[in-house]
Image: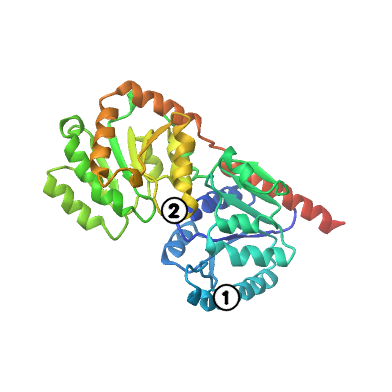
Amino acid sequence: MPCFFPHIVFSGGGTGGHLFPGLAVAERLRCDMPHARITFAGSGKDFERQHVARTGFEYVALDCHPLPKRPYHLPRFVTKNLSGLRAARRLIRREQVTLVVGLGGFASVVAARAATRSSIPLFLLEQNVVPGRANLWLSRWAETVCVAFEDSVRAFPESVSTVVTGTPIAAGFSSASARPEDSRPRQLLVLGGSGGARQLNEHVPEAISLVGQPLASWHLVHQTGEADADSVRGHYRRLGISAVVKPFLNDMPDVLAETSLAVCRAGGSTLAELAATGVPAILVPYPHAARDHQRHNALALVRRGACQMIDPRESGGSLRQRLSRDLLALVTDAQAQEEMAISMAQQGRSNAASDICGLIQERLERFDVARAA
């Protein structure tokens, strides 16, 4: 255990898929290293500020901008990121930052790159089978890249040090452990990620209506994101379906512990939470995800028998019909649900946050030894 007082910065977090794994590791570090100072450096979005504030960690906003799709946006991209890089380097010097953990996405780049330019150790967390462009670019300077899937290792150059840890998730999931399928209440969870998913919000209520009687006794929970909550509630009312509709679920461990089946996107954090609680799923990958990473995430679990996948690009405009058909087949086949639940639980890596924390502590111990010498 280091005897000095390290300052660890978690860089990034524009979405829940990037932010929540970082928060899980930071929470674990706070337990194991109570003397450490922990700061989150993000893009300044309210989403980041609110969730970091809830945990009590420090937060700082840095200028950053995603890689533009159109050439005329390049000047803003360069100006914003150079400003963020300078601010990050000042932060590292002024606050004596010891180590930086990059969370992926454009919001992670300025502080992560500032760390490597200042000879500060950089760790990266990669939650998806197909690594994001930010992590691929930063990996050349990283000491360690912690990946969620074994399939991800070969996506990085051989010179990059990768460790398969799984995706870190909140400590609450360890108490909401997977239970045998026949002991679960029959609950269907519709989950669109931290911001919701308009495609699911529009099509799932209709699909449930088409299934009809086999789902009549099920409890329905639908997480919509802020923008669509009212419209989805109205949609269920018009269809005569009783459903709990919420913009965001703060109690995800408890909700998943009571869930029999999920319909959701295929982000890395969502899949890790499903695996931790052994919840089988029909995955509908976001078709515009960077480098099609959600489809690759889903395929990794389909191959292991842990879920089913519907690619909305291959549904020919009939996503609700395809959803209703697959839902009907699963909710009327208890054995299939149980087999998928068992396979999903086998994919879980409940020690991911602890393992990553251990790697960080080992690096800090080496730093402390070198400092003492």
Q: Secondary structure at mark 1?
A: helix
Query: Residue 170: image x %, image y %?
Result: 49, 45
Query: Residue 145: image x %, image y %?
Result: 64, 49
What amino acid is found at the position of numbered circle 1 in the picture? Answer: Val
Q: Which residue has dot 2 on it?
A: 289
Q: Which residue has dot 1 on it?
A: 78
Residue furthest to the top in view is 335
Residue at 22% x, 52% y is 232
Q: In this rendering, would 195 be left or right of 35?
A: left
Q: CA distance from mark 2 to mark 1?
A: 24 Å
Residue at 14% x, 48% y is 237
User: Taking the image as drawn, is residue 184 in sight?
Assistant: yes
Q: Vertical placement of 98 versus 162: above or below?
A: below
Q: Residues within 10 Å of mark 1 (few under 14, many from 20)?
A: some
User: Taking the image as drawn, is residue 179 in sight?
Assistant: no
Residue 161's label in the rendered image is none
How many marks the image carries: the answer is 2
Q: Residues within 10 Å of mark 2 (few under 14, many from 20)?
A: few
Query: Residue 56: image x %, image y %?
Result: 50, 60
Query: Residue 280: image x %, image y %?
Result: 38, 33
What amino acid is found at the position of numbered circle 2 in the picture? Answer: Ala
- Upstream in the sequence, badge 2 or badge 1? 1
Colour scheme = rainbow
Residue at 53% x, 64% y is 107
Out of 301 and 69, give the one closest to the viewer: 69
Out of 177 and 308, give the one closest to the viewer: 308
Out of 356 and 236, give the one closest to the viewer: 236
Q: Secondary structure at mark 2?
A: loop
Q: In this rendering, would 54 be left or right of 334?
A: right
Out of 26 and 116, give the one closest to the viewer: 116
